[in-house]
Image (cartoon, grey):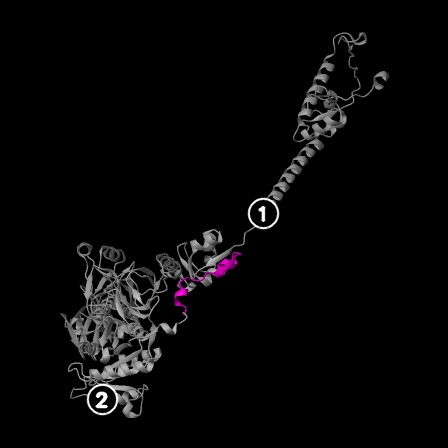
Amino acid sequence: MQKDKNKKKTLTISGSFNKKLGSSTYKNPAKKSFSVDTRKNFKAAPKFDKLSGKPTSATRGKPSRKNFNRKFAEQQATRRFIHTEPKEFDKSKEREKGTDKSKGIKSRREFKLTLSRAMNVEEFEIKQRSLASVKRARLKEKKSTNQDNIKKEFKKVIRDVKIPNQITIQELSNRMAEQSSSIIKFLFNMGVTATINHSIDSDTAEYIVKEFGHTAVIEKSPALELNKEENIDKSNLISRPPIVTIMGHVDHGKTSLLDALRDTNVVSGEYGGITQHIGAYQVLAKDKKLITFIDTPGHAAFTQMRARGSKVTDIVVLVIAADDGVKPQTVEAIQHAKAANVPIIVAINKSDLPNSNIAKIKNDLMRYELIAEDLSGETIFVEVSAKNKTNLDKLKENIILQSEILELKAQGEGNAKGTVLEAKIDKGKGPVATILITSGKLEKGNYFVCGNTFGKIRAMIDFNGKNINEAYPSSPVEILGMHEAANAGDEFAVVDSEEESKKINSFRKTGVNDKKILISKEKTNIFDKANDKKGLNIILKSDVQGSSEALKTAINKIEHAEVKPKIILSDIGMINETDVSLAKASDAVIIGFNVKPNREAKNSAEQLQIRLEFFNIIYKALEFIEQSLSGLLEPERKEKIEGTAEILKIFKLSKSGKVAGSKVTEGEIKNTSKARIIRDGKVIYDGGILSIFREKNAVKEVKNGLECGISFKNFVDFKEKDIVESYKVDVVKRGIND
């Protein structure tokens, strides 16, 4: 026993991992348990001969079962230990100890389980996990470093972005090399809803460019070169005919006077005797001197036409009817002339009429600072008669005299410039424009730009309808060769080449087109729901731009609190199928002013039941629109009290139910009227009368002072001393001018 006590303590591995051996047990919650024990009755392991591999004599014989189990358990534990050891640990150990350099095989001693290794399995696992986390951290750090390097390599490029007057969002994104969605998002955050096809002005574009970190460069327009004042060569100046605009109130004889001067009959061709577009003519005076006359409409709707005429004129002839005097359009014409700073010659027409009052006209004009020469003023007054052609030569002489005082001169050579007086689309000729040349020489074959269109002069027609090859300052000519219809009032200019005309037009198309422009937040959304008014959708087609412009302006002036006109399309030319399709889609009425539909459009309108209306006089068209808008108004309901009665007693009848025995105190009570019951000043019932009884007989009405029984529709909760008020409601149609 003493010998056994002195035996050396040896490491053993228990085959059962939950069994406690001796005093020391190590358990890993994730792995199997290792136990260390000191056994008292323990035999030493047998020794083997190194050469033969057989046990030595001291230990020969069959090994014990315990020894076999112990060795097997040690081998199993060693294998498990090797598998749980981290790779990084294996590699380090491989370098430090136990590596067979010749064969690359690890030493067995390295994998031999020891007490320290068995006790530190958890430490190895923790180390394994910590090494993996360190590795992940290093990879993450390396990745972030690479990203920083990429950012440094791809540093944002600051660009010089050219900005025209107006630019689409798509084009702006391309020039900045930024995503269009980023720009749209930026605008949305500012409260502006837009798409890539919307246009923005230069100020907004410049702000966006700066916010995105780029440099904005305002692009100079090539079209601006056309408007620059050229160095005037005084040696090339020639005297030009005066441009005279005839203005005045409607039906005062402006066109009749011009006809008398030209010895023509233009007024007979005007619908209703009203001029509805600008006409330009030349009249020969004494000494073969020419005078260019511009005839403007007198109707209130043609204000813009009169303003346009006054801007291009040298002298204004103010026509006033002697029997009618100063009228609103007369005052308006005076204002336009003074705004343009041009002299005024007053032509008092119809002076031969017996009821003419010329003295009153002169006195009335004094308040507008037009003082006649015979009253110590400077304004020329000429009494004329267009009908009898009296004093026409005197009027011409005064115009020539005034033009000589003004010393009217212009460039006789060089590229021509002018103003569009009128534009239209002719069925046979295409887009046609009436041009008033202000300087230079216009020749057939010249390339030109005009507003948002361009072209080449294919033909020129003078005021007499003759084809000409050249025209000089103050000459009104009709030109053919435009790619699109121009707008009245557009500036006309000849350029040197077709390439230049296309370049300028392209810039104007992209920079001036305002069909989808977003100038401000308030004008961003074309589908604005701020106004819930009922609307009359209108498609407007006219013969010329001036008439279209005048009609559009007059229609937009029609205002009402509940209804409004809405122009879906305003264009010139014949009514076509496209217009009919648009009218169907928008539930609109088509108004043709001096135009008719083609056959296809007419048939399509009949099939789709689209309303077509045609007019030749502007105020007739306006009257139709006002009537249509009036039809959209809710009728006015007017209430009229017919009589009152007091409930004195309540009766119950088998057939009629409860009946209010009443006495009529005022007016009369009818069975067809409406009634309300009032109790203590409050209305407790508002409905209809079911029946009225008089001495057990049903009657239609009961007059003042008589007693009767009244039953009401779906109401029996009336009481004594309630007041019955009988009334009727009249429905009255309303008009927008009421």
Q: Which residue in the rendered view is the most extreme toward the front?
A: 235
Pointer 1: residues within 10 angstroms few (<14), some, or many (20+)? few
What label sits on residue 151 in the rendered view? Answer: 1
Q: Is residue 472 above or below residue 204?
A: below
Q: Amino acid at mark 1?
A: Lys
Give x and y (percent) for residue 48: 77, 11
Q: Quadrant of the N terminus?
A: top right
| Image quadrant in which you'd find residue 332 | bottom left
Residue span colored magenta: 206-229
| Residue occupying the point 20% across, 82% down | 392
| Image quadrant in which you'd find residue 35 | top right
Give x and y (percent) for residue 243: 29, 76
Give x and y (percent) for residue 261: 20, 78
Give x and y (percent) for residue 125: 68, 32
Residue 122 vs residue 597, the one in the foreground: 597
Q: Earlier in the sequence, mark 2 or mark 1?
A: 1
Q: Is residue 270 above or below residue 212?
A: below
Residue 591 is inside the magenta segment? no
Query: Is residue 350 shown left or right of residue 336?
Result: left
The residue tagged 2 is: 358
Q: Is residue 730 among what the camera can see?
A: no
| Image quadrant in which you'd find residue 436 | bottom left
Residue 669 vs residue 248, the one in the foreground: 248
The label nearer to you, 2 versus 1, is 2
- Secondary structure at badge 2 equals helix
